[in-house]
């Protein structure tokens, strides 16, 4: 015999969403009950188009009371609860969901977020109307299912509830949370359940009071075992710790949590991110790889944490290690899984540029990965390429016959090495955009063009002294004052990076001579750019000179070790890693040295390092597995 089911809702000023919600369920339920709590728009009139069960209730700052008011009118076997900005997919079959006869069903909520991403979580939205189930709590209301003596049977619904209001809730949530704090504190004081403590901690995290959040969440944590909120509570606690940069404390909690909840990908993903925050590269990469093994699953799942976002993070981290082969493998997988996600698209183009893949090959492969069939797709591609100053921007503008602003066209021509065309356009444009200051400065330096420099300097926020200094650099004139300001160093370092990309090595060498008069930090940054684009030999020569001047600078020693290791100069790498261990007791020095000994298969040195790592760094997981 078929069971009956009622939709029970509470609403207020929901004319924008209500019709879509009710259309999605009107042919799937036997009764629709709507309780309005004070609408001043067309909400009530819309509701009456679908049901005569429309009731009114004065709002008393109590969500549980309003929910209970709605369910008391239900005359069916089961109750379905939705909010107005939610709806069911057309394929949803409510009768199929309740055939098992469970007392309540966990249902997946698919929260649509910004940037075409989503967050999925489970909530009880279908439950029996004959088990004396009712809502508790003024805020963050939930059903009274915790009484173990009642022996309630739970089930898992297969349908998905779509929720489109998540982004708006996030934007408005902080103000709502501040208004609701007094009510929540009263609720916790009267009834300090795990749910109330969790919601109190979550609210404090949301308004940026992380220490208070941690206090409540730590009280709730021991009480949350075996509850569906356990993983969400742990993530909220660890994020609060992370906001205070207490990564080690968060990782201690996560190490236990991922064992207890092995299929909660959000826990593993956060663990991987925090490993990277403390520079545990190996554990970060190993843990993020486990996310791919699990996939996007768990009670609460941020879309992509077990798929395209995990690949994206791995691509970033391998790129940091200048392992472009593995970086490319992961960004390619990410692009295949989510080709319309701008950060992935941008990272894809950066990595293949650093790998020096021919532009024609890039163009062909990109068209296969991202076939453009509408203006929105083309617009996204052009925006990404413009922000990257990618040399293929001009090709796409020409291929699709796109008319763009003059500054975009000039930028496209410049980075496609059509310097004359770009020069002519830059000199014609009126009302220049500040974001093009560096572009024009770069071209003025390549062409030694005084007029272009005049246009650039008005956009770069330079002092008169900086303008004079920069003019001498562009015109390659001797400069009596060798000192560069931090602002000028930053601008010139950015220009030099683009000179490397454009392979304008003559201009690069001239600019390098000036930058070499600057701070140690900017010199290290220059070497990072060279290594990043594969110019290891030039970088080694420069780094050796820096090492001679600054023999205890950790950044210089580490980069020398890394670039020698990637260039297979193992004896030199060992020299610098040994030096790094002398001047720094930081974990990174040990991990880098171990990688070297792996490469040269020095088992004795490996075992010695593993002993030291296990003693000094108890959070390190990979070393225990290899010991």
Image (cartoon, grey):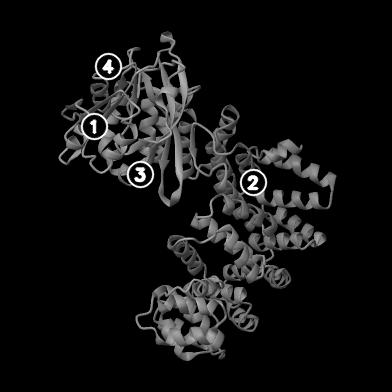
Q: CA distance from mark 2 to mark 1?
A: 53 Å
* Residue 470 visible here: no
Q: CA distance from mark 2 to mark 4?
A: 54 Å
Image depth: mark 4 or mark 1 in front: 1
Q: Nearer the viewer, residue 440 or 555?
A: 440
Residue at the image position 40 percent from the left and 75 percent from the top? 434
Q: Quadrant of the C terminus?
A: top right
* Residue 448 visible here: yes
Tell me the SS state at disc 3: helix
Q: Which residue is mark 1?
A: 50
Kindly check if marks 2 and 3 are in contact, taking CB atoms under 8 A apart as contact. Answer: no
Q: Nearer the viewer, residue 348 or 229?
A: 348
Q: Is residue 431 left or right of residue 423?
A: left
Tell me residue 611's x, y (percent).
75, 39
Residue at the image position 42 percent from the left and 8 percent from the top? 149
Query: Circle 4: is it few (<14), some (14-19), or many (20+) Cα within 10 Å?
Result: some
Query: Circle 1: is it few (<14), some (14-19), or many (20+) Cα within 10 Å?
Result: some
Q: Which residue is mark 3?
A: 170
Tell me the SS state at disc 2: helix
Q: CA distance from mark 1 to mark 3?
A: 30 Å
Reply above or below: 519 against 312: below
Q: Which residue is mark 4?
A: 75
Q: How many marks?
A: 4
Image depth: mark 3 or mark 4 in front: 4
Tell me residue 89's x, y (percent).
40, 36
Tell me the SS state at disc 1: loop
Image depth: mark 2 or mark 1 in front: 1
Q: Residue 285: which disc? A: 2
Q: Is residue 125 left or right of residue 537?
A: left
Tell me which label, 2 or 1, sits earlier in the chain.
1
Query: Circle 2: is it few (<14), some (14-19), or many (20+) Cα within 10 Å?
Result: many
Tell me which label, 3 or 4, sits earlier in the chain.
4
């Amino acid at each position: 015999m078929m069971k009956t089911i009622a939709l029970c809702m509470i609403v207020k000023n929901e004319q924008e969403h209500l019709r879509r919600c009710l259309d999605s369920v009107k042919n799937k339920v036997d009764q629709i009950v709507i309780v309005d709590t004070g609408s001043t728009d067309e909400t009530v009139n819309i509701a009456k188009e679908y049901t005569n069960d429309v009731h009114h209730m004065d709002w008393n700052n109590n969500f549980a009371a309003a929910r209970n008011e709605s369910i008391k009118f239900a005359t069916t076997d089961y109750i379905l609860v939705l909010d107005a900005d939610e709806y069911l997919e057309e394929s949803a079959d409510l009768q199929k969901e309740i055939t098992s006869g469970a007392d309540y069903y966990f249902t997946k909520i698919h929260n649509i977020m910004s940037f075409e991403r989503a967050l999925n979580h489970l909530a009880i939205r279908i439950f029996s109307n004959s088990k004396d189930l009712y809502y508790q709590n003024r805020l963050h209301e939930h059903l009274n299912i915790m009484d173990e003596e009642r022996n309630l049977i739970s089930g898992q619904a297969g349908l998905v509830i779509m929720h489109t209001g998540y982004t708006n809730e996030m934007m408005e949530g902080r103000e709502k949370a501040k208004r609701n704090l007094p009510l929540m504190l009263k609720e916790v004081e009267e009834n300090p359940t795990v749910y109330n403590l969790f919601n109190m901690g979550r609210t404090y995290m949301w308004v940026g009071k992380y220490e208070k959040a941690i206090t409540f969440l730590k009280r709730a944590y021991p009480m949350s075992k075996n509850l569906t909120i356990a993983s969400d509570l742990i993530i909220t606690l660890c994020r609060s710790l992370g906001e205070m940069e207490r990564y080690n404390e968060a990782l201690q909690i996560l190490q236990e949590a991922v064992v207890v909840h092995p299929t909660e990908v959000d826990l593993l993903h956060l663990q991987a991110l925090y490993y990277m925050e403390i520079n545990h590269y190996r554990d970060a990469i190993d843990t993020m790889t486990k996310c791919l093994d699990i996939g996007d699953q768990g009670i609460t799942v941020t879309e992509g944490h077990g798929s395209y976002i995990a690949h994206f993070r791995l691509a970033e981290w391998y790129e940091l290690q200048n392992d472009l082969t593995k970086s490319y493998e992961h960004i390619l997988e990410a692009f295949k899984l989510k080709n319309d996600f701008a950060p992935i698209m941008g990272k894809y183009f950066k990595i293949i540029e650093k790998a020096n893949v021919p532009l024609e090959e890039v163009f062909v492969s990109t068209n296969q990965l991202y076939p453009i069939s509408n203006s929105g797709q083309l617009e996204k591609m052009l925006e990404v390429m413009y922000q990257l100053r990618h040399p293929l921007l001009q090709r796409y503008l020409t291929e699709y016959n796109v008319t763009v602003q003059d500054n975009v066209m000039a930028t496209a021509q410049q980075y496609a090495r059509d310097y004359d065309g770009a020069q002519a356009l830059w000199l014609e444009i009126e009302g220049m955009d500040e974001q093009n200051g560096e572009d024009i400065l770069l071209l003025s330096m390549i062409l030694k063009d005084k007029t272009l420099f005049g246009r650039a300097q008005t956009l770069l926020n330079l002092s008169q002294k900086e303008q004079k200094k920069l003019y001498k650099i562009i015109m390659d004139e001797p400069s009596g004052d060798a000192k560069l300001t931090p602002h000028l160093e930053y601008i010139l370092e950015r220009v030099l990076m683009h000179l490397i990309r454009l392979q304008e090595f003559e201009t690069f060498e001239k600019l390098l001579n000036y930058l070499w008069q600057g701070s140690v930090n900017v010199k290290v940054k220059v070497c990072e750019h060279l290594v990043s684009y594969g110019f290891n030999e030039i970088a080694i020569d420069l780094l050796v000179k820096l090492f001679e001047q600054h023999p205890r600078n950790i950044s210089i020693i580490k980069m020398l070790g890394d670039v020698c290791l990637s260039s297979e100069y193992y004896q030199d790498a060992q020299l610098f890693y040994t030096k790094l261990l002398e001047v720094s007791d930081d974990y990174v020095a040990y991990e880098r040295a171990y990688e070297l000994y792996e490469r040269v298969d020095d088992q004795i040195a490996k075992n010695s390092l593993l002993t030291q790592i296990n003693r000094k760094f108890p959070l390190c997981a990979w070393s225990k597995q290899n010991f």
